[in-house]
Every structure is written in C-alpha cells, then in structure tokens.
C-alpha cells in the first residue's frame, strides 16, 4: 500500500464557518479524510466573497510542514435557478443578435433569446456592451442540452456551446471548492521551486507525476504552455520561465510574471520583458527571437522581430515569423526542432564548433545550438563561421528595471495581474486576454467562471497558491477574473496573478491530488509546476 505522507505532518487545525451542504461528487481522498475527522469551531469572519454573504462555508486546515499550511474551503450549494442551455453564438452588436434570432425562428427554434453582456475588461477603453449572447433552451440535464446542440448543428449552425448558467458570472449560490497553500518563507526550511515536466522543455507530465518524482510535500500547476504541435513545441513554456539562474524561455513581452525569488531575496509580481542578442566576433549583432522552442511559432505572441499578426500579447493565439534565430540549450532535450534552415553548435567558450545545413541536430551538454530560418539562417552563414565566436546575452526588464538572475532566481509566466498594492488591478486587455475581432473570447475566458490557479503575496511576505475547481456543476462552478481577484484579496494577498487554469488547474498535497480535474480525460499533463520540497 502506498504511503500517504512521505514526511511527518505537524498538528492539524480545523475551522468551520457554519455547517455546509455540498455535493461530494468524487470519492473522499486520504487528505479529505484527515481533514473531515477534525473537530469544528464556528465563526463568521473572513468569508470568501463568492456569491451572497449568507452562504454556508466550511474551512479545514492542516500544517504540512513548519511554515506551510493547507486549507480546504467548501462554500455554497447548487442553485435551483441554474440550468444547462446552448449558446448559439456570441456576437458584437445587437443587430447581429436579432438577425440570428430571426434565422433561428425561421428554422423552427422559437425559444431562443438574447442576453446583453454589459461587463467589459476593467482596462478596456471601449465603452458599451461587450456583446450579445444568443441562447436557447433550459434543461436540468446536460444530455438534453447536448441533444438541442445536435439539432442546431444539423441545421447548419456552428460554434455552438453547451453551457451551465452557474458558470455565467452572474448571481449564483455555487458551490465552490477552493484549495489554499500558504507558505511562510521565513519559517519554511525547505525549497520552493518551479520544476519542468520530464526535467526538460519537451513533453508534458501531470502535476501528480512531477510532485511524486520530486518527493514534494505539496505542489500546484504553474504557467501557460504549448499543448499541441500545430502551435509549436508541445511542453514549451508560453512565456517566461527561469529556474536556478537559467533563463529557459523568453517572455511574452509586457505580460505579468511571478518571481518566486530574486537577487533581492524576495518574491514579487512584475510586468516582464526580455531582450536577447547574439554578437559575432566580427562585430555583427542579431536579435535572438526565442529560446528552446520551434522557430516560426510564437504561442501567446508578444515576441520580437516582425511577428505576425502582432508583437503584442494575444492569449491562446499563435503568431508566426518565417525568419527567426532560436537558441537551444540542453534543458530543451536531446535534439533541436528539425526543418529547413541551418544550425551552428557553439561550445562552452562561445566558439563555433560545428555548422549544420539543416535543423534537427544534437544539443551538447554544455554550450548551445543556434538555429536560424529565413534571414536568420543567412546571418548565421555570414557571421557564425567555424572558429568564430558568438556571444549570447539576455536582459530581463521587470516593471521598468533590470532583473538579475542568480542561482536562487525563479520566474513563472502567467497573467493577467489581479491585485497590485492591495487594490484590484486586472490588466486583461493590456496582457492580451481581449481579442478586438472576437469579444466573445474575453467573455469566455475572463467573464465566465472557469477553474483557476492563482498566486499571491501577502503584506508579511507569505506566499499564497490557490486553486478554484470549476466546470463541475454540483461540485464547484469556478470563478471569473474579478471573483479571483476578490478571493485573493480576502485571503490577505496585496499582489496577485492568474496562472494557467482550466483543465490545467491542479494542486497536490503529499501523494494526494486535492483538486478535481475538469477535463473529461482526467488530470491534464502540463509543462511545469511549483513544488514545495523539504
């Protein structure tokens, strides 16, 4: 029988905020069993700002190690007013909505209606409604909504979505399941580190596997990443990643990142950009477009060198550039991405040791490989000949000042920022979570409730890692950006950031996963996690 705990656990405390009714839709885990047997003390202080203030809430906590506390929060209950329905489309104007409504009625769908979505991103300068939802049906069973979706599809309608109204972002009673890790860095004697799946950029692994492999006492999923080959290298960090003083992935320029530790010895959240240059011994200088990824595909955009369609951040979108210089180090894997172009192998002293007329060769354990496509390949041919030297230097700018890397520096991509200096400050438009040509993207990503992974810093320096389960009616409905910011503020954070969420949202405690996967296939393989290791 597998051990539940790898290391002794400190005494357990439990706090219950009134009695609570919630649907236990999955079997009780060993951690839940340990939490649920504890005595309960009632209090009404510090309720989560989810739903109405009078909702029932239960909190139970356990100390995992000196300076590390885990708390599980169950809040609210399933609302009798929520139901399943079908979103036919999200359109920008009322005229478009009315035209679609008319078409539906002509096709015999007489119960469709229009909902105005008034809320826009906090930093959206455009005024007026975000758009209009054309919706049809009211069902207690998801299967019945799916049947209506199929009927609409048979009539030629596309872009259909079966949704649960408890996830709309409007008033509901929940329920919610929230997991909180609080780390007092002054008291915790272990290490808090970001870890790559498979200890490499390439490939993915579940957080449970990453945590087990590193003997972690707790862990949480981390940054955004490339999921499929059409968007780049699967497992590539879609934004900045630095660990143990090594910059592994370039920033989505201007997007917020979590800096777990810095040269100054403290954690913070900053708007981060990177600038990387290759300088030849003949004096020629060329911008390095990226690190440890497939040339030509820039997930979440925010790159340099003339990327199309934009050099600004654009979430869940892949920008392109046919002329890129990419640096690979051994953390990428054994070989570079194959394809047209050329490569040069640079040894540990910066000397060009090998020239390759196509991409896809071995990566040395020390030194690096510079791969070029288009004009960048020509630059390598002219300025990276055998025996010449190539020096690659990186600069990281955070909130307008240069950030230095040392052996304790760790950086994880995320976004948008949620709290700054104790105030709600959600910069979703600035960080690319609003698509001008498709307002429905922000509605689905930021206004609707989804599973969330959040990180925050309290005034006393303690770190908070929070997950909110979602897409699970009867278990937990998730949270939108504004609710996420309010949750972090209520837990004591003064600065906070949204990390990768949705199907990636996962937290482990000991050998136990304490979150419920929202993907039908189960726990999603991810690119990186943040681990607490003793």
Image (cartoon, rainbow, N blue to C red):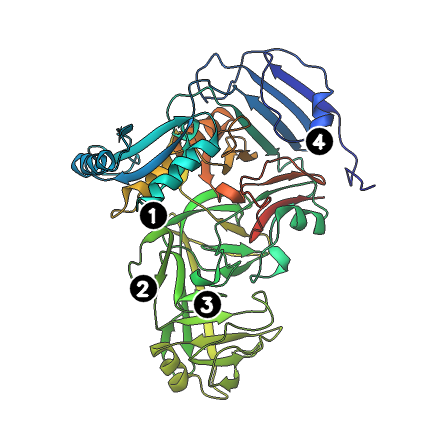
* Residue situated in front as seen by the camera: 22 or 196: 22
Comparing marks 1 and 4, which lies closer to the viewer? 4
Q: Which residue is mark 2?
A: 307
Mark 2 nearby-residue class (10 Å; few <14, some 14–19, many ≥20): many
Q: Is residue 420 left or right of residue 95?
A: right
Taking the spot 39% from the left edge, 76% from the top edge, the residue there is: 373
Task: Name the disc covering residue 31, or none.
Answer: 4
Task: Tell which residue pokes out farthest to the front in this image.
Answer: 108
Q: Earlier in the sequence, mark 3 or mark 4?
A: 4
Q: Earlier in the sequence, mark 1 or mark 3?
A: 3
Q: Which residue is mark 1?
A: 432
Mark 3 nearby-residue class (10 Å; few <14, some 14–19, many ≥20): many
Q: In which quadrant is the C terminus drawn?
A: top right
- Measured along the vertical axis of the image, is residue 106 above or below residue 82? below
Q: Earlier in the sequence, mark 3 or mark 2?
A: 3
Q: SS of the residue at dot 4?
A: helix
Q: Earlier in the sequence, mark 2 or mark 1?
A: 2
Quadrant of residue 180 within the rendered picture: top right
* Residue situated in front as seen by the camera: 395 or 219: 219
Q: Which residue is mark 3?
A: 294
Compute the Cα span from label 3 to label 2: 14 Å
Taking the spot 50% from the left edge, 88% from the top edge, the residue there is: 387
Q: CB of mark 4 within 8 Å of CB of mark 2?
A: no
Task: Tell which residue pokes out farthest to the right in this image.
Answer: 1
Q: Earlier in the sequence, mark 1 or mark 4?
A: 4
Q: Is residue 129 left or right of residue 27?
A: left
Q: SS of the residue at dot 1?
A: loop
Q: SS of the residue at dot 2?
A: loop
Q: Give the total number of marks visible in the rendering.
A: 4
Is residue 428 among the parts visible in the rendering? no
Mark 1 nearby-residue class (10 Å; few <14, some 14–19, many ≥20): many
């Amino acid at each position: 029988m597998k051990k539940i705990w790898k290391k002794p656990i400190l005494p357990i405390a439990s706090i219950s905020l009134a009695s609570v009714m919630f649907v236990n839709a999955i079997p009780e885990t060993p951690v839940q069993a340990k939490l649920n047997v504890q005595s309960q003390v009632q209090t009404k202080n510090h309720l989560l700002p989810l739903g109405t203030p009078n909702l029932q809430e239960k909190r139970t906590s356990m100390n995992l190690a000196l300076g590390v506390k885990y708390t599980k929060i169950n809040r609210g209950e399933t609302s009798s007013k929520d139901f399943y329905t079908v979103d036919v489309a999200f359109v920008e104007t009322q005229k478009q909505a009315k035209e679609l409504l008319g078409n539906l009625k002509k096709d015999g769908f007489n119960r469709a209606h229009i909902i105005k979505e008034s809320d826009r991103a906090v930093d959206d300068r455009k005024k007026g409604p975000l758009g209009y939802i054309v919706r049809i049906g009211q069902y207690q069973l998801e299967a019945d909504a799916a049947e209506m979706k199929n009927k609409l599809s048979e009539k030629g309608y596309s872009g259909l979505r079966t949704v649960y109204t408890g996830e709309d972002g409007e008033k509901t009673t929940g329920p919610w399941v929230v997991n909180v890790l609080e780390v007092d860095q002054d008291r915790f004697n272990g290490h808090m580190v970001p870890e790559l799946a498979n200890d490499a950029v390439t490939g993915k692994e579940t957080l449970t596997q990453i945590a087990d492999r590193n003997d972690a006492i707790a862990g949480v999923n981390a940054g955004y990443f490339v999921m499929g080959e059409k968007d780049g290298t699967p497992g590539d960090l879609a934004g900045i990643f630095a660990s143990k003083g090594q910059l592994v992935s370039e920033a989505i320029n201007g997007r917020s990142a979590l800096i777990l530790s810095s040269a100054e010895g403290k954690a913070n959240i900053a708007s981060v950009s990177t600038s990387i240059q290759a300088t030849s011994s003949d004096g020629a200088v060329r911008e390095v477009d990226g690190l440890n990824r497939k040339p030509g595909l820039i997930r979440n955009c925010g790159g340099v060198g003339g990327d199309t369609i934009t050099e600004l951040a654009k979430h869940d979108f892949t920008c392109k550039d046919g002329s890129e210089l990419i640096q690979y180090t051994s953390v990428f894997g054994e070989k570079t991405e194959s394809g047209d172009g050329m490569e040069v192998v640079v040894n540990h002293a910066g000397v060009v040791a090998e020239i390759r007329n196509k991409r896809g060769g071995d990566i040395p354990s020390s030194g690096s490989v510079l791969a070029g496509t288009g004009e960048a390949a020509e630059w390598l041919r002219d300025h990276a000949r055998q025996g010449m030297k190539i020096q690659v230097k990186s600069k990281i700018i955070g909130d307008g000042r240069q950030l230095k890397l040392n052996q304790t520096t760790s950086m994880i991509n995320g976004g948008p920022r949620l709290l700054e200096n104790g105030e709600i400050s959600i910069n979703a438009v600035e960080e690319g979570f609003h698509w001008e040509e498709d307002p429905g993207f922000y509605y689905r990503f930021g206004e609707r409730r989804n599973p969330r992974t959040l990180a925050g810093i309290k005034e006393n320096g303690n770190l908070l890692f929070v997950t909110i389960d979602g897409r699970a009616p009867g278990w937990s409905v998730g949270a939108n950006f504004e609710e996420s910011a309010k949750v972090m503020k209520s837990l004591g954070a003064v600065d906070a950031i949204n990390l990768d969420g949705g199907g990636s949202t996962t937290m482990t405690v000991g050998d136990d996963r304490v979150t419920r996967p929202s993907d039908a296939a189960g726990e999603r393989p991810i690119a990186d996690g943040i681990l607490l290791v003793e």
